Amino acid sequence: MVAAPEVELWFVREVLPLEASLMRFLRNSYRNPGELADLRQDIYAELIETAQTKIPDPTKPFVFALARNILVSRMRRERIVPMETMSDLENLALASEAPPPDRTVIARDELRHLRDAIDQLPPRCREAVMLARIEGLSGREIAARLNLNESTVSHYVKDGMRKLANMLYGTSDPQGDPA
């Protein structure tokens, strides 16, 4: 057992100078800034309890490892929802996250219209738009895949998007051409 004055001296000499770094670590790692002071106190309490048995050496890595462990434990506890809370939520009859049936039907209809419009695009234009907008490939990746220049790919994507907008929303083509 380590004497209390020795623990206190160690805490003041070794731990308190780390407080600014510790708080920066906690601010960057924990999403609730209102609880940072309590979290720091929990870390300090655990440090002192540990030091009463044996003073950690080196101090800094121990402090940050302990802080990380306490953060992980706290985050795990926050994810656990008590059963009383669940029954309260059920009694409130909260709406589910699923969209209502009418929105689902509208979304499916819009998706069908989009698919039909994409099918009407010229083949190379359709390929470029699908690779860019649906698969998220870059112009360089599309150019390599389709064996085209990047400028040609860019033209196909722009032209395809303009034609899709015209087909779906009835917008006029800025170049005056009907899609």
Image (spheres, rainbow, N blue to C red):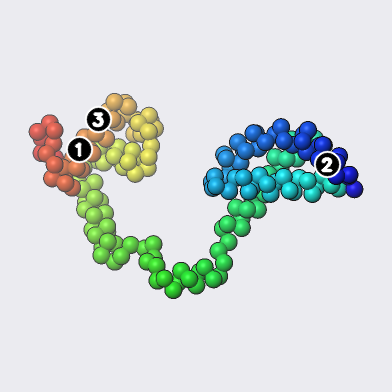
Nearer the N terminus, badge 3 or badge 1? 3
Measure how far apart labels 2 and 1 are at the Cα level: 72 Å
What kind of element bears circle 1? helix
* Vertical position of residue 104 compared to residue 26: above or below: below
Type of amino acid under label 2: Val
Q: On the image, numbered disc 3 is attached to which residue? A: 155
Discs 3/1, front: 1
What kind of element bears circle 2? helix
Q: Give the percent coordinates (x, y) of residue 11.
A: 78, 38
Q: Nearer the viewer, residue 99 or 165?
A: 99
Type of amino acid under label 1: Arg
Q: Indicate the quadrant where residue 83 lies.
A: bottom right
Q: Give the percent coordinates (x, y) of residue 45.
A: 73, 48
Nearer the N terminus, badge 2 or badge 1? 2
Discs 2/3, front: 2
Give the left or right position of residue 129, taking residue 173 as reference: right
Q: On the image, numbered disc 2 is attached to which residue? A: 7
Q: Nearer the viewer, residue 124 or 138?
A: 138
Q: On the image, numbered disc 1 is attached to which residue? A: 162
Measure how far apart labels 2 and 3 are at the Cα level: 71 Å
Nearer the N terminus, badge 2 or badge 3? 2
Q: Give the percent coordinates (x, y) of residue 22.
A: 65, 37
Type of amino acid under label 3: His
Measure how far apart labels 3 and 1 are at the Cα level: 11 Å
Q: Give the percent coordinates (x, y) of residue 130.
A: 31, 42
Q: Nearer the viewer, residue 100 or 157?
A: 100
Residue at the front extreme of this rendering: 5
* Vertical position of residue 44 compared to residue 149: above or below: below
Q: Is residue 112 visible?
A: no
Q: Nearer the viewer, residue 5 or 25?
A: 5
Q: Indicate the quadrant where residue 84 lies.
A: bottom right
